[in-house]
Amino acid sequence: MSRFLKTHLRNFATRDDGAVTIFGLYLFLAVSMIGAIALDVSYLRATKTQLQVAADQSAHAAIYRRSSQTMEQAQQDAVAITDQILGGAKFKGALTTTDIEFGTYVSETNTFVADSLSRQAVRVVTSLERERDNAAQSFLFRMVGIEDFEVLAEAVYTAYKPGCLREGLVAEGVVDLQSNNSFLNGFCVHSNSYVSLNQNNFFETGTVVSMPNIDDLDLPKSGFEKNEGLDEALRNQKIKIRILDQVKTIDQRLRSNDPNTVPDYIWDANIQQISVKTLSMADLEPGHMYEVGCTGSGLTIDGSAPLKDVVIITDCDVKMSNGAALENVLLVTTSTSDKSITSPNGFRMGVNDNCAPGGGAQIVTAGGFSVASGLELFGSQIIAQKDVSFAAAADGVGGASIISAASIDGTSQSGFGFCNSGMEDNISVDYYRMVR
């Protein structure tokens, strides 16, 4: 029992005016304990909240920075952020670099598995402990001999990629699709404005059609009756399409040999300069990167044989000849014209290999993309800063990501399949969420 409490009890016990009873002693003790609980518990709750906020913010900062920094740099940055959030002597040492662990998160069992090489998840623990000499000091609980408390808070963040940005049609503007299209389980149609559909489209169970407000969906009067599965597919959702900001610098990252940007089929990252009017594999060597200047009005991709295992950077408008194909190719153009990538007919991206790994292709343009007919996409991706318009071949899409900072306009009679594999070379950025 503390000296304070003993002194007061002694004073009560030695009074002889008859007003103090044993009941009074217990009453005094009870009131003191209630006061201690009210004051100290409120203080501990506030302290716990501060530690939790710091853990949450630090975990988010750590995993975000880990995407482009070393583990040590990410840890140091997270600690610096925590020091700014908490401040004050009482929180000194609440978070150190050893309290930040990277690893993986297993959602089925809600467990975190430490792995210093991983960039997929992070666990942060902020703490006030006697061992650190920063335990939270008590107030009235000192009367019963409790000098301090240990307080801990934990946060676990994990990286993920939104399904719509992995496989689907995603645009800041309108996504306008016509009639008689089929969308299979897992495929996504999303607009940050609204989606417009005609009739006789089929949406298999598990398909997503989303926009910020589904009341903005544009349909003919018989729309739900003539678009099977659409009602179940609708979602209210707005997506921050972060990849659109990232691709603005993709040509610079390729030139600097950024390992997170250069595809794994490239073994010589030194960029070679060439200038041609029509580009074919006769001008290229697999495993290399090229910056292609164009002669005349633009650059034409030869359609006699697929381009394979190369990176092409250009500032030209690019026209695909009939039958042109890209397999394991990253094509980047900085042209800002409305039709910086065009094809009259029969343009194929990727290998029709039932979603097997490898073989896909990616096109990134600062302008627009337009294919008149017969677009085939297999484990491939198109990212455009302007409008995308296409007429896909029937059942010619199996694993596709089309992303536009403007609008997407698709026609009829197309089947959009879902792979969930074989998309490993697609350009993406991580999103982050708290899981614990």
Image (cartoon, rainbow, N blue to C red):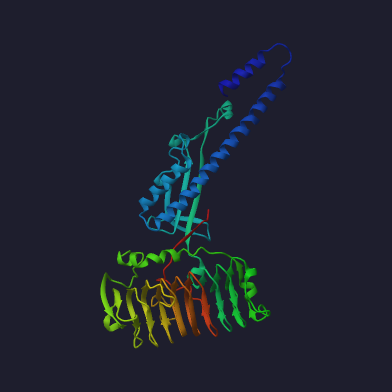
Look at the image and tell me whether residue 86 can be seen. Answer: yes
Could you say where residue 307 lies in the image, as x and y percent from the top left?
Answer: 34, 81
Q: How many marks?
A: 0
Q: In this view, does 239 lie above or below 33?
A: below
Look at the image and tell me whether residue 354 can be seen. Answer: no
Could you say where residue 146 lies in the image, as x and y percent from the top left?
Answer: 55, 30
Between 339 and 201, the one nearer to me in the picture:
339
Residue 344, by quadrant, is: bottom left
**Can you say which quadrant of the picture contains the N terminus?**
top right
Could you say where residue 30 lies in the image, as x and y percent from the top left?
Answer: 67, 28
**Left or right: residue 419 compared with residue 262:** right
Q: In this view, does 291 lie above or below 114?
A: below
Q: Seen from this angle, which residue lies furthest front? A: 296
**Left or right: residue 71 compared with residue 163:** left
Q: Is residue 316 above or below residue 434?
A: below
Q: Seen from this angle, which residue lies furthest top? A: 16
Residue 276, by quadrant, is: bottom left
Q: Is residue 41 above or below residue 11?
A: below
Could you say where residue 431 lies in the image, as x and y percent from the top left?
Answer: 48, 61
Between 145 and 55, the one nearer to me in the picture:
55
